[in-house]
């Protein structure tokens, strides 16, 4: 059961239109928590909003590119009149994948702004209010990619490593004030974005998690911060954090090529 007195009456989900974000929205709405859903594409956003309104909760939508210069100002304007007890930052993505030295620096900066800068800004804004109230929760979506360097997604992987260390620090600072923080680390998840990317989910030995299971697991373990590795990937995360780095990094790269049918 989701503790609505701890995490309600409103939750903000950045990246709340499809996949894991939509699954979070459905779980929270079923528990009676009102929602502010933020996503770039208005179509899927409106579809998710209509679906979760059937639970009888109030839902606000904000069709917004988080890379817009005034993104945080727009989010504040949409939420300043409500009490937000839960922030879920599910918006991080590899928005520009490319070999680093031949890539476009502005593209890489976009990955950093999406995965790091906006995450920091929203955690700062909502976390301060939660601390003052003495309750609340923050879920930052992490990735197994953040445990290891990877070709063509070096900046994304590095941003996810940053997210994990940031979550651990934020957890330390907010725990004494009744605010729960967890980075929910996902492995391969059957989201629409991963389907569109052409991932091969049938690679032998590959652990694949469904979005609904990922969201449910994240909410169940909100008090088990600072990091919770979801979908049976705990051993994989331990291995990726080990040594020797050269062998581990190359081995993971070979698996990723299979996943991407390269």
Image (tube, rainbow, N blue to C red):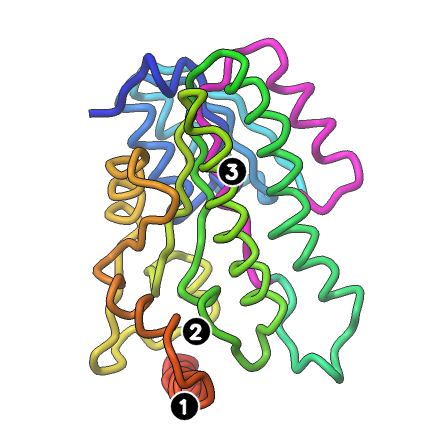
Of 49 and 157, which appears nearest the observer?
157
Of 48 and 125, which appears nearest the observer?
125
Circle 2 Cα neighbour tier, 10 Å, few/some/many (<14 / 14–19 / ≥20): few
Magenta span contains residue 73 = yes
Q: Could you say where residue 245 lies in the image, as x and y percent from the top left?
A: 45, 83
Kindly check if marks 1 and 2 are in contact, taking CB atoms under 8 A apart as contact.
no
Residue bearing the label numbered 1: 247
Report whether 149 appears left or right of 78. Answer: left
On screen, residue 188 above or below 240: above
- Magenta segment boundaries in residue numbering: 66-94
Circle 3 Cα neighbour tier, 10 Å, few/some/many (<14 / 14–19 / ≥20): many
Give the distance between the C-alpha atoms of the residues marked 1 and 2, in whole angstroms: 27 Å
Q: Earlier in the sequence, mark 1 or mark 2?
A: 2
Location of residue 230 by image quarter: bottom left
- Tell me the number on the disc at residue 220: none
Residue bearing the label numbered 2: 198
Magenta span contains residue 219 = no
Residue bearing the label numbered 3: 170
The local secondary structure at tag 2 comes to loop
Q: Earlier in the sequence, mark 3 or mark 2?
A: 3
On screen, residue 22 above or below 110: above
Residue at point 25% right, 77% down? 202
Q: Could you say where residue 192 lies in the image, as x and y percent from the top left?
A: 41, 57
Kindly check if marks 3 and 1 are in contact, taking CB atoms under 8 A apart as contact.
no
Give the distance between the C-alpha atoms of the residues marked 3 and 2, in whole angstroms: 35 Å
Q: Earlier in the sequence, mark 3 or mark 1?
A: 3
Residue at point 71% right, 47% down? 67
């Amino acid at each position: 059961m989701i503790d609505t007195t701890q995490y309600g009456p409103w939750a903000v989900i950045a990246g709340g239109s499809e996949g894991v974000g939509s699954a979070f929205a459905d779980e929270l709405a079923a528990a009676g928590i009102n929602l502010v859903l933020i996503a770039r594409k208005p179509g899927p956003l409106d579809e998710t909003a209509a679906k979760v309104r059937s639970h009888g909760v109030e839902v606000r939508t904000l069709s917004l590119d988080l890379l817009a210069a005034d993104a945080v100002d727009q989010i504040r304007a949409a939420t300043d009149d409500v009490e937000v007890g839960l922030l879920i930052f599910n918006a991080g993505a590899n928005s520009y994948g490319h070999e680093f030295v031949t890539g476009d620096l502005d593209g890489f900066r976009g990955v950093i702004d999406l995965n790091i800068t906006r995450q920091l800004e929203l955690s700062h804004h909502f976390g301060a209010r939660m601390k003052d109230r003495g309750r609340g929760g923050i879920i930052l979506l992490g990735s197994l990619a953040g445990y290891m360097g990877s070709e063509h997604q070096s900046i994304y992987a590095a941003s996810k490593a940053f997210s994990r260390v940031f979550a651990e620090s934020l957890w330390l600072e907010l725990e004494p004030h009744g605010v729960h923080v967890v980075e929910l680390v996902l492995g391969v998840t059957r989201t629409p974005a991963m389907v569109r990317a052409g991932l091969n989910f049938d690679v032998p030995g590959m652990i694949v998690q469904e979005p609904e299971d990922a969201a449910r697991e994240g909410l169940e373990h909100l008090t088990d911060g600072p990091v919770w590795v979801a979908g049976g990937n705990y051993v994989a995360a331990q291995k990726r954090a080990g040594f020797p780095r050269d062998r581990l990094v190359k081995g993971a790269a070979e698996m990723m090529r299979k996943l991407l049918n390269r």
